[in-house]
Amino acid sequence: MAHPLSHWEDRVETLPRETIVDVLEGRLREDILTGRHPAGSYLPPERQLADGYGVTRTTLKHAFGRLVQAGLLETRHGVGTRVRDYLRVGGADLLPMLVRHSPDWIGEIFEVRRGIGTLIAGRAAVRATARQHAELRLLLTAVGEAADADAVQLADIEVHRALARATGNRVYLLLTNTLFNAYLPVRAALRGPFTDAAAARARLEPVIDAVTAGDEAAARQAAEDYLTATERIMLDGLA
């Protein structure tokens, strides 16, 4: 007779182990974002900093490398490692990390989401082709037929990507991807609008109707209504 846990063990994926570099990276990132290491300041010498965090210099260098890549630090040979002023020189690629640090960023991301989403819907209404109209209808149907909240949410994202493509402006598509990536760290907490597939489709359908009708003003209004309603539900879920 099979052990009662054998089937469960076959299905469960091993969770990744957090390394000392992961822990140190998190500590340094937190200390930078909370101002313990202010923007523009140089970090203490490596040996001193490594001793202070209780790690080796090799571990510290690995953590530094990750934070340099993330845009929070810059290292100059013979000079030292300085904290970058990410609000002055950083880009949108920092947003996922900032959301992990503080959910307060979500409100600001949603404000941009409303503005960009409304603009995209209006542009799509003017520029979308008949083929893109058909694609939007198919993707809307997929939202209503998705099996669970996670699948509905992903199907909804594809509708918005298609709307951005329909503008004919690739920058809108990159901005759409950036905004979705920004709240990826808390996506599981933002499933509220997607728990009912039929309701999710009904909320989104007026946007698609207006875009495929070529009505720019109606598309902008429908998008604003949709984004405001889903934002409210998602923020309630975070609360």
Image: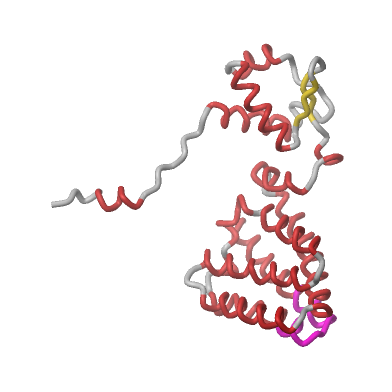
Q: Is 222 part of what is drawn in magenta?
A: yes
Residue in view at x 72 percent, y 47 percent: 95
Height in image: 51 above or below 222? above
Look at the picture and state if 155 lies above or below 203: above
Which residue of the protein is positioned furthest toward the right in this rendering? Answer: 88
Residue 177 image offset from top left, x and y in percent: 70, 58
**Which residue range is magenta in the image?**
208-223
- Can you name the residue that lies furthest to the bottom here? 213
Q: Is residue 1 above or below residue 134?
A: above
Please check the rendered image and state whether residue 44 is part of the magenta-colored stretch, yes or no: no
Q: Is residue 111 left or right of residue 103?
A: right
In this orientation, which residue lies closer to the viewer: 232 or 109?
109
Q: Position of residue 84 (x, y in %)?
A: 81, 32
Q: Compared to 24, does 208 lie above or below? A: below
Q: Which residue is found at the position 77% from the left and 68% from the top?
A: 117
Closer to the camera in the image, 146 or 103: 146
Q: Position of residue 216 (x, y in %)?
A: 84, 81
Q: Residue at x 58, y 78 (%)?
A: 199
| Lateral position of residue 154 relative to residue 114, left or right | left
Q: Could you tell me if residue 221 is visible in this image?
A: no
Q: Residue at x 82, y 17 (%)?
A: 79
Which picture quadrant has residue 166? Answer: bottom right
